[in-house]
Image (cartoon, grey):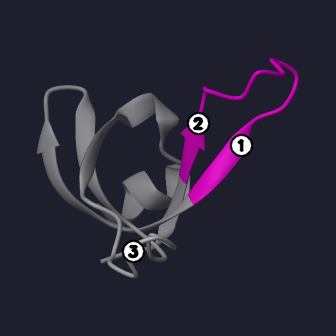
């Protein structure tokens, strides 16, 4: 298990990248990873749900740990 980052391309400013903390990659399918996010949903107090993200949006450190 290796922690790392995930890059979001949803940032409205194309000159800036937003990075979100990932605890670990839990699965791989094609060109994407299923990741466990760090932190909790402030509304529910529960961990964020696992989601699929493109491999290209994951930091080299995160991918290396997988």
Residue at 37 percent across and 74 percent down: it is: 44
Say what secondary structure mark 1 lies in: strand
Say what secondary structure mark 3 lies in: loop
Mark 2 → mark 3, Cα distance in angstroms: 19 Å
Numbered disc in front, either 2 or 3: 2
Q: Which range of residues does the magenta coloring cover?
A: 6-20
Image position, residue 20 (x, y; %): 59, 56
Which residue is tagged 3? 2
Marks 3 and 1 close (CB-CB < 8 Å): no
Q: Give the dominant element type of the magenta stretch: helix, strand or loop.
A: loop
Mark number, residue 18:
1
Label 2 crowd bin: few (<14), some (14–19), many (20+), radius 10 Å: some
Quadrant where the C terminus sits is bottom left
Which residue is tagged 2? 8
Residue at 84 percent across and 22 percent down: it is: 13
Image position, residue 19 (x, y; %): 66, 50
Say what secondary structure mark 2 lies in: strand
């Amino acid at each position: 298990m290796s922690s790392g980052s995930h890059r979001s391309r949803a940032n409205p400013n194309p000159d800036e990248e937003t990075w979100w903390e990932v605890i670990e990659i839990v699965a791989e399918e094609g060109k994407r990873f299923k990741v466990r996010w760090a932190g909790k949903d402030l509304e529910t107090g529960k961990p964020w749900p696992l989601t699929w993200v493109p491999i290209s949006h994951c930091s080299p450190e995160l991918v290396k740990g997988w």
